[in-house]
Image: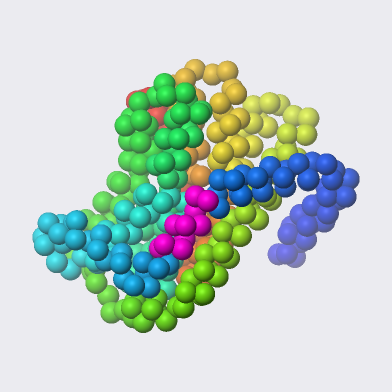
């Protein structure tokens, strides 16, 4: 009985594919164009690079720039700085892969990895600047204020864990086999892992793009339809938000909320990437939902 909803969803998907092939083709085409034209050239080099950096322990060089912090907190995990920096710069879902790999090698405990998954797996600042602020909000929103609303919940969450659990060896050095774990991977293995991750992302983007096409074809109340579309995939959601005739400050607050949670497609990508490390996707969803609500209200107050 537990699998009945899943079986029914597969059955209805089969009916949809049979009776609405034009919507499936259009959705698949849009998703694959987004994947091949934007996601692959953007993320694949980062997947390959982080794999090589882990293999040759190049990520440890990032901790040099945080020497004053590590000097004061000598027990702090040396991988923490590189995880936070790369997770922030590279964004979702690469942040999830970095955390998952370091949990698997023993650098982080599962509890630490769960915290970092929520903190590091966010929308990339480059995407926010180039797409959200420029194309969607037309450079009419202050970038610093937007980033403040977007990342403040993550920062507070991270600092809370640091100050509450640091004395209990939270985010401290652990006995690990990091070097042997990563160095054992051949170049072919790293390339295969990167390609597997990028292909799975493409499949999820295609599936949720088809779902967006289905929602667009259904007769319904526009605000409900647009809200559901916004939850499907972040670029689609922000695009629909751009077309809505609402006040700029409210639009910016909604953009902040959508960017914070990353859409169902981003959650599905994250779930696939962390399945080997067995981090909890349910906890991740709950905290991301809380952060998105906080970012929305911060946006209403500040933007």
Q: Position of residue 101 (x, y in %)?
A: 42, 69
Q: Position of residue 114 (x, y in %)?
A: 40, 61
On the rendered image, what quadrant is the N terminus found in?
bottom right
Residue 58 among magenta residues: no
Asked whether 111 or 64 is in front, the reply is 64
Question: Which stretch appears magenta?
Answer: 41-50
Asked whether 294 or 44 is in front, the reply is 44
Q: Quadrant of residue 38?
A: top right
Q: Position of residue 102 (x, y in %)?
A: 38, 69
Q: Position of residue 293 (x, y in %)?
A: 45, 38
Task: Name which residue lies at 18% across and 56% down.
Answer: 66
In the rendered image, is residue 171 in sight? no
Asked whether 241 or 294 is in front, the reply is 241
Residue 44 among magenta residues: yes
Task: Name which residue lies at 56% across and 64% down.
Answer: 195
Q: Is residue 85 left or right of residue 276?
A: left
In the rendered image, is residue 214 in sight? yes
Task: Name which residue lies at 35% across and 41% down.
Answer: 151
Q: Is residue 198 left or right of residue 79?
A: right
When the figure is inspected, residue 30 is found, relative to residue 277, above or below; the finding is above
């Amino acid at each position: 009985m537990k699998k009945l909803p899943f079986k029914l969803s597969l059955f209805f998907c089969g009916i949809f594919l049979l009776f609405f092939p034009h919507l499936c083709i259009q959705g698949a085409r849009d998703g694959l164009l987004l994947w091949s034209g934007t996601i692959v050239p953007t993320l694949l080099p980062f997947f390959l690079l982080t794999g090589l950096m882990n293999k040759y322990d190049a990520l440890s060089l990032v901790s040099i720039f945080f020497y004053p912090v590590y000097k004061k907190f000598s027990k702090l995990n040396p991988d923490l700085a590189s995880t936070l920096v790369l997770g922030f710069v590279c964004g979702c879902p690469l942040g999830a892969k970095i955390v998952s790999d370091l949990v698997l090698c023993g650098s982080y405990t599962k509890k630490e990895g769960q915290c970092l998954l929520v903190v590091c797996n966010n929308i990339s600042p480059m995407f926010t600047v180039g797409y959200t602020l420029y194309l969607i909000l037309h450079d009419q929103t202050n970038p610093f204020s937007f980033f403040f609303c977007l990342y403040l919940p993550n920062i507070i969450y991270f600092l809370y864990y640091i100050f509450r659990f640091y004395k209990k060896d939270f985010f401290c050095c652990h006995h690990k086999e990091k070097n042997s774990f990563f160095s054992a991977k051949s170049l072919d293995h790293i390339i295969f892992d990167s390609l597997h991750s990028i292909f799975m992302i493409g499949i999820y983007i295609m599936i949720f793009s088809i779902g967006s096409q289905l929602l667009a074809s259904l007769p319904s109340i526009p605000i409900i339809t647009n809200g559901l579309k916004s939850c499907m995939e972040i670029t689609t959601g922000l695009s629909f938000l751009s077309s809505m005739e609402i006040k700029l400050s409210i639009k910016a607050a909604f953009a902040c909320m959508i960017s914070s949670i990353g859409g169902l497609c981003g959650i599905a990508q994250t779930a696939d990437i962390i399945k080997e490390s067995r981090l909890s996707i349910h906890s991740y969803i709950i905290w991301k939902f809380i952060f998105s609500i906080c970012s929305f209200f911060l946006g209403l107050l500040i933007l």
